[in-house]
Image: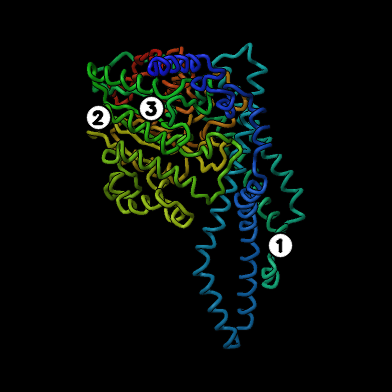
Amino acid sequence: MTRSITESGASEDAGDLERRLIDPRGGDVEDDAASPAQRSLLAIASSVLVEISLPKLLFAWIMSLVLPAVLLGLAPLAVTVWFASLSAHVKALTEIGAALVLAASAAIGWLAWRPFLRIAESNFWALNALVVQPGYLLGAELLRHLAERAFAGRMTNIRRARLRAASSAAAGVIMCACAIVILVLVWPYSRWTGTVAELALVHRLIVPMIANAVVLVTAYLAAASLVWGFADATMDQPADFPAFDVAPAGRHFRIAHLSDLHTVGERYGFRIESGRRGPRGNARLCRALERLAEIHATRPLDLILISGDMTDAGRATEWAEFLDAIARYPALIARMIVLPGNHDLNIVDRANPARLDLPFSPGKRLRQMRTLSAIAAVQGDRVHIANVDDKPMRSLNEALAPYRTPIANFAEHGGLRLAMGLGHIFGDQFPMIVLPGEPDGLGVAILNSNTESHFSFTNALGVISAEQARRLVAALDKFPDAAWIIALHHHLLEYPMPVAFSERVGTALVNGSWFVRKLKPFASRIVVMHGHRHTDWIGTCGSMKIISAPSPVMGADDAASTHFYIHTLVRDIDGRLCLIAPERVEISRPMPSA
């Protein structure tokens, strides 16, 4: 009797589970909290304003904008004080004491000017990255967006290119005029000379120092916006790919290009961007890896490129799921290259877009170290760190060897002190280079295109640093006969397709036009491959080929299929890198979770 009651109760409990009011496996409204696919950006922004910590935001603004402006504005005052002191002692050279003071002042100036110049320079470029370049980009893309909407019914590729060029020139002129107006308005509050007594009371000089910084930045913007605007107007504009090449004779390279896997750490977890409109869990990722293994077994691949966003928020559990998923396919790992995306580095809190990191927060550093560790686990012995001298390139694992213990200690204990000790490591590893197997073979340059964002709401911006570009050019010059894949996460420019204005200014490289011009000398022997937009697009910028990868995971719920592409690259007899029509690989609907 007891057993039958127990069995009856178990049966009733199972029935109650199937009739539950809310099925947690399907998620709920909380899964859509930060999803632009489910909520408007205005609604998300409203939530951010309600939830954000205003004292923390104020402190972050002071550290990111006010402090750099104060230090930059202080520079001319400090320099004039030093020169004034030096001049006074020169006039009194008849006295032994004055001569000694003069010598001491000169020595101090000689020793201090280099670090002082570096401080002023770093703060200037910090303000440039935060204000000037994004401001120019915002103005240029706004003009392009309005112009394309005005002429939407009569748009052709040629007209779009001309409209984009004209908008760039107009944006340069308008931004120059705006900068001059601001400069004129702020100039009366600036001050370019000071005394030692005044420097001792720095708080009284805060307004003049900020005004000085505004004058310097706006003067730079006035000149730079004209240069950028007309350079953007005269450069090759992006266009849809005209026609694929007929396969020429030569070595064929088969490249599987995936991106934006957004691995989650929960069996029924949803992605930040898609919310309940996207897939649950990681079944679709596993299916994509299965298809890759099937294809590789019959027609071997030369390279599997995953161009960023391996995880949804850079959490340890997500990296664990990703590494566990690929560990079942050692043949794929041997050909796999991964690179960092904004979701791997810049999502402060996947459940709360209002949360922000302070500029020196250990959280950002921890996400970098997780990403670097995963990259090293996948390709640490196969990629080398680019340099600008003639020394042999070290492998990633060799470069990281001295830091293994500090990184492990930081991951175990955290803390600001340990985080600051690792500050330079992540950026120093890029570009990573897969060396060409032969002098005229195929190499891969792996870039980090992510900004130093500390706020989930602005996590998607991208930039290529001048130092990284310099190392990249040096690496390409070392192999003048090789063809190259330039792999990064962000798209270089806005491509000729309809897109919401919020995407135009929030997702592309801030300095994409500049970077395209850096790549132009190598255009005939490179192809740029990226992800980020989850958009299926192949195009050109002059003679340079650009491939945007769709996500084999995002963009469809559990009921729909997704896809990725296998691209074939061939070097022709003239050394030009040819692109053959790609092979589309469908990822069927995964089996339902048990």
Give me the disc on residue 205: 1
Marks 1 and 3, how far apart at CA: 51 Å
Q: Quadrant of the N terminus?
A: top left
Q: Circle 2 sits on which residue?
A: 330
Q: Amino acid at mark 3?
A: Val
Query: Which residue occupies 67% across, 17% down?
Result: 150
Q: Amino acid at mark 1?
A: Leu
Query: Which residue occupies 66% across, 27% down?
Result: 43
Nearer mark to the viewer, of 1 and 3: 1
* Residue 517 seen in the current view: no
Q: Amino acid at mark 2?
A: Pro
- Left/right of residue 132 with respect to residue 422 in the rendered view: right
* Residue 312 seen in the current view: yes
- Left/right of residue 441 with respect to residue 414 in the rendered view: left
Give me the disc on residue 527: 3
Q: Residue furthest front?
A: 1
Q: Position of residue 278 (x, y in %)?
A: 50, 20
Question: Foreground residue, 247 or 352?
Answer: 352
Q: Dots 1 and 3: beta carbons under 8 Å? A: no
Q: Position of residue 275 (x, y in %)?
A: 54, 24
Query: Which quadrant of the structure image shows residue 196?
Result: bottom right
Q: Position of residue 161 (x, y in %)?
A: 55, 21
Nearer mark to the viewer, of 3 and 2: 2
Precedes in sequence: disc 2 or disc 1: 1
Query: Which residue occupies 31% across, 44% down?
Result: 396
Q: Secondary structure at mark 1?
A: helix
Q: Quadrant of the C terminus?
A: top left
Question: Foreground residue, 344 or 177?
Answer: 344
**Disc 1 crowd, CA 10 A, few/some/many (<14, 14-19, 20+):** many
